[in-house]
Image: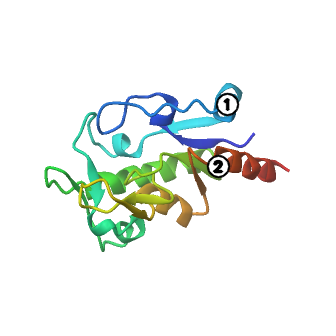
């Protein structure tokens, strides 16, 4: 049985920067949970950040690949450089994925860790632009396909192809 890495906040865990969750009510995700496929994970918490914590964005909206390459930082609203925690969380996610032989993930869109299609632009003004978070970039670099919570049906198609 294929396992799936999933953002802990989508599973109802209160790990987001604001202390909340973004619980998904998707039926397919609920089915996978029942089957024991899901491996909930929050890279920001696993990287050492507290809950709640100041919001963070990748400077200049550069994206996770730039952070991995050392060309951009992740900064919190209070000005703190939290790049190290984001990198540590991404590495921890990759390690967990490796331990379960995970080939796919469903992660929270927009997050500077988990965003797969869009991230915030680094100005803390609520503007998004195309890009990936740090964890998503690292997982995809290692061949793990990342889907957002809005693309669970496509994730289901991918899962069926993996298990065919």
Q: Residue at x 28, y 69 (%)?
A: 60
Q: Is residue 80 above or below residue 2?
A: below
Left-right relation of 76 to 109: left
Residue most extreme to the right? 164
Mark 2 lies on residue: 101
Q: Is residue 133 visible?
A: no
Distance in Å between CA atoms under marks 2 and 1: 24 Å
Residue nearer the viewer, 50 or 91? 50
Q: Residue furthest top?
A: 34
Q: Residue at x 72, y 45 (%)?
A: 156
The answer to whether 152 appears left or right of 109 in the picture is right
Q: Which residue is mark 1?
A: 27
N-term-proximal mark, 2 vs 1: 1
Q: Nearer the viewer, residue 34 or 116?
A: 116
Left-right relation of 150 to 54:
right
Q: Position of residue 2 (x, y in %)?
A: 71, 43
Looking at the image, which residue is at 23% across and 60% down? 123
Helix, strand or loop at mark 2: loop
Q: Is residue 151 above or below residue 131?
A: above
Quadrant containing the N terminus in the rendered view: top right
**Corner quadrant of residue 115:** bottom left
């Amino acid at each position: 049985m294929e396992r799936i890495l999933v953002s802990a906040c989508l599973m109802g865990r209160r790990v987001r920067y604001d202390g909340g969750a973004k619980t998904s009510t998707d039926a397919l995700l609920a089915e996978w949970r029942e089957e024991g496929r899901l491996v909930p994970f929050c890279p920001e918490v696993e990287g050492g950040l507290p809950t709640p914590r100041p919001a963070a964005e990748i400077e200049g909206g550069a994206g996770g690949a730039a952070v991995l390459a050392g060309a951009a930082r992740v900064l919190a609203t209070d000005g703190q450089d939290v790049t190290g925690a984001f990198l540590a969380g991404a590495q921890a996610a990759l390690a967990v994925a490796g331990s379960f032989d995970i080939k796919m993930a469903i992660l929270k869109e927009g997050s500077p860790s988990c965003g797969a299609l869009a991230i915030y632009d680094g100005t803390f003004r609520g503007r998004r632009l195309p890009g990936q978070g740090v964890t998503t970039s690292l997982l995809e670099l290692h061949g793990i396909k990342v889907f957002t919570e809005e693309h669970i049906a496509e994730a289901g198609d991918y899962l069926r192809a993996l298990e065919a």
